[in-house]
Amino acid sequence: MSDILFTPAKIGPIELRNRTIRASAYEGMAPNHRPSQQLIDYHSAVAKGGVGMTSVAYAAVCKGALSFHRQLWMRDEIIPELRELTDAIHRNGAKARIQLGHCGNMSHRMYCGQRPVGASSGFNMYSPTFVHGLTREEIDQVVLDFGNAVRIAKESGFDAVEIHAGHGYLISQFLSPYTNHRKDEFGGPLENRMKFMEMVFRECLKVAGDDIAVMAKVNTRDGFKGGLEVDDCVKVALKLEELGVHCLVLSGGFVSKAPMYVMKGRMPIHSLTDYMPWRLWWLKLGINMVGKFLVKDEPFKPAFFLEDARKFRKALKMPLALVGGLNSREIIDKVLDEGFEFVEMARPLVYDTEFVNKLREDPGHCSPCEHANYCVARIWNYDARCHRECDLMPQVTWRQKRELERNLRKNRKYNN
């Protein structure tokens, strides 16, 4: 058993009581794009459950950045409600972080109120929708939007911000050759494709000053042929270290191309579509017909990004947090002993907000979460809930229950 896990550690200007962080996994608990009592209660419970810092996700930096109808949108009018959230987290002994991002081409006019934007123009099958490539003037405005969101986070009492530069969201869309086909100064070689990212982080670090920590979520690789591979992702990380980012969160995957690479396991397609409103009948039908062919299964294993992350640990001096499959004290201690300063987890804390306290009490503790990904399927239209609550929710159909049982059996086969 490692001696590191429950020791304090610093990220920039802040200090966490231990090395655990609730990962920035979208909760779906912000109707009308503002914090709900449910969101406050959930993060309060996670803080009370012993985590060093809990992260609120995924907050859009402007209206055009929205990708869900129950997603936070950073604006001045919600500062008092965000302050209630951070105060509740602080009362329970944890630090509060908020993830700031722009979904880029992974949106739709029904959410963002405009034609979605991206690194390049084209058609995105994920939404599905036509996408407008950002002009230079629009790029400058998005950079300012990120800075303004950091200001709002500071005024709301957050201790840290995490800028989302992975998973195929807007910054990642500029970085990846799969989505960046620009012919100007922001396209072509990786050095050019990193320019938008550099502009965003310079602005965020300037606004943050010495008051709050600035972290970045980055890919270890995009997870498919034609995307960024490990060596280029290490170069991205080195640039962020040079800029002065306080800590990197190492993840992977591309939601619009390789979604299960992000979290592993199987996507319960019917659970996803059953929760969609009937006005989207055409989308429901299409996903039910071809979803299992488009969303590739990824077998789950503990610490599934660790092998690639070791290359980042070797190349970088800055603090690193690893996310992905950290579901037991044994595997968490292994990661910390390999030189990573922090560990992040989400699904174990959806299953049980007391997960971290149980790690302290029982050196052999392992989360009972079986990665059925029902919580992931729900968040497109509702809140993140564990499949074990199915019997308590009247909207759950017999088809969903049958599908989840099938996924659980398949996951057990993977794990054995």
Image (cartoon, helix red, strand yellow):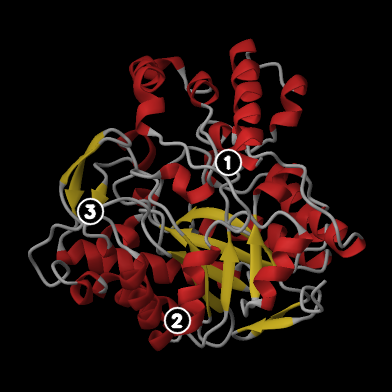
In the rendered view, would you say 346 is above or below 183? above
State the residue position of label 2: 205
Q: Classify 10 Å Cα crowding around label 1: few (below 14), some (14-19), many (20 and above).
A: many
Tag shown at residue 28: 1
Judged from the image, the secondary structure of the residue bearing numbered disc 2 is helix
Labels 1 and 3: the sequence-earlier one: 1
Tag shown at residue 109: none
Nearest to viewer (mark 3 / mark 2): 3
Judged from the image, the secondary structure of the residue bearing numbered disc 3 is loop
What whole-number distance in Å separates the C-alpha atoms at marks 3 and 2?
26 Å
State the residue position of label 3: 179
Labels 2 and 1: the sequence-earlier one: 1
Q: How far across and down, in percent of the image, does residue 383 sit? A: 62, 36
Quadrant location, the C terminus:
top right
**Identity, as a three-letter code, of the amino acid under mark 3:** Thr
Q: How far across and down, in percent of the image, does residue 190 sit? A: 22, 72
**Which one is in front, 116 or 297?**
297
Labels 3 and 2: the sequence-earlier one: 3
- Tell me if residue 383 can be seen: no
- The residue sitting at the left extreme is 183
Q: Classify 10 Å Cα crowding around label 3: few (below 14), some (14-19), many (20 and above).
A: many
